[in-house]
Image: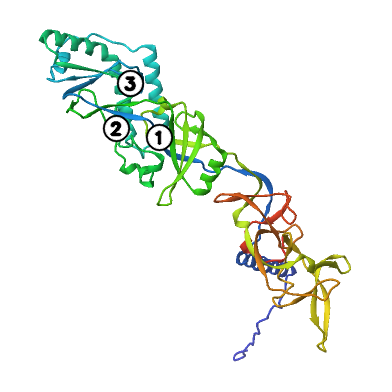
Amino acid sequence: MAGTRNNITKYRKPINLNIGMVIFAVIFIYVVVCVIMYLSTDHVVGYEVKEGSLSSNNIYKGIALRDEEIVNSSSAGYVNYYAREGERTAVGNLIYTVDETGKLSDYIQTSETGENSLSEEDLYSLKTEISAFANGFDRTNFSDIYNFKYNIQGTVIKLANYNVLENANALNEASNSALIDYYYATDSGIVIYSIDGYENLKLQNMTAEHFDQQNYEKTHLVNNELVAMNDPVYKLSTNEDWSIVIQVDKELAEQLVEEEYVEVKFLKNQYTSWGSVEAFTNEAGDTFVSLSFTNSMITFCTERFIDIELMLEDKTGLKIPNSSIVEKEFFIVPKEYVTQGGSNGNTGVLLETYDDEGNTTTEFVETTIYEETDTEYYLDDTVLRSGSYLIKPDSAEKYAVSKTGSLIGVYNINKGYADFKQIIILYQNDEYSIVKSNTNYGLNVYDYIVLDASTVADNEFIYE
């Protein structure tokens, strides 16, 4: 009908809770809360104690000290060498000549010198030098390239010696005068064609500045160079006895001196040798150790700085990370005040207390012993208070708790809580320590300790 209004009421659906969705929501909220708690809580990580060893970094750069005699030229002119660097020469062997006019160099260049070839011995020596340089080259020490260059030149000089000598004789005969001066070795030894100012250096003159290679200067004495009278022309090392000096701390120096002889590895060729030990500390407080040898000098005769490794014994024991080590304070009590009591017969002390009426009474308090000396015990400071009185068993004597001391240890978690255990450190590097095993109040192999001691408190329960 016209004018009739139809009132339509919207039907509301009843809330239909799905039990599965509710359970899922509860689980989801629980997981989120657990994740948040996990991320915001310090985590206790365990570490299993095992036997192990530490290899310390015993590699040093040493300074070689030898008996070295610098020989100066007796005349001026162009010098030509006939003895190869690094080889032993006998008394009377020709070492060098001095060409006063420079005509020898011109004569060699204009004359037919013939052909030469390397002997098997020379070829082996050359290959050895090249291989040693390639294996030991350090890009940070670019100056080593120049040392290698002059060593190779020494091999070439030896090959050309005979032709140069023939030319020198021919030049003297042609001029009917001695234009070329010949100089021979006056002593036996190893020939070296360089100087560096360290020739007279001794252990007692050592300073830290001597080890600064940036300020080190080495002058090579080059073939066919012009020299003046009294200029250095070569150096002779006359003694097979030599030494290497390294800079160390006083503790290591004392250890090495006590051992008297130390096995040394030369990193250049991996050879080893035993050196006798001598130590010296200068006025600046720097400590140096000299390692003396009776062989191998000729192998390193051209080198002043030599890399070595001290072959010291590795330290063995219980290996633990340094992060697990902590220092803790304890009360120190005379042994006669510690007794056994309680229902279990545990160790403890008789503590003087007061009842509600103010009367003095004695209470047995269990306490753990963490370390002992001949006359005293280290007791836990969580059950005792400074100023408290302890009663001596079977006596009226009292002891006021006051003396304290600290121990180095770790937190053992074998029983589910952080239990302090004292350790005796035998050796330590930047990451790990070797501690003594089977001590009365310490650790044993396969114990579990807290990896990071800063994440727990004493006697805190550990939740896995």
* Mark nearer the N terminus (3 vs 2): 3
Q: Position of residue 232 (x, y in %)?
A: 24, 29
Q: Is residue 398 above or below residue 431?
A: below
Location of the N terminus by quadrant is: bottom right
What whole-number distance in Å separates the C-alpha atoms at marks 1 and 2? 13 Å
Q: Which residue is mark 1?
A: 64
Q: Which secondary structure lies at badge 3? A: loop
**CB atoms at circles 3 and 1 under 8 Å apart?**
no
In the rendered image, which residue does mark 2 sit on?
195
Q: Position of residue 46 (x, y in %)?
A: 68, 56
> Residue at horizontal 48%, vertical 39%?
278
The amino acid type of the residue labelled 1 equals Ala
Residue assigned mark 3: 187
Q: Earlier in the sequence, mark 3 or mark 1?
A: 1
Q: CA distance from mark 3 to mark 1?
A: 22 Å
Disc 2 is placed on an element classified as strand
* Viewer-side residue, 429 vs 44: 429
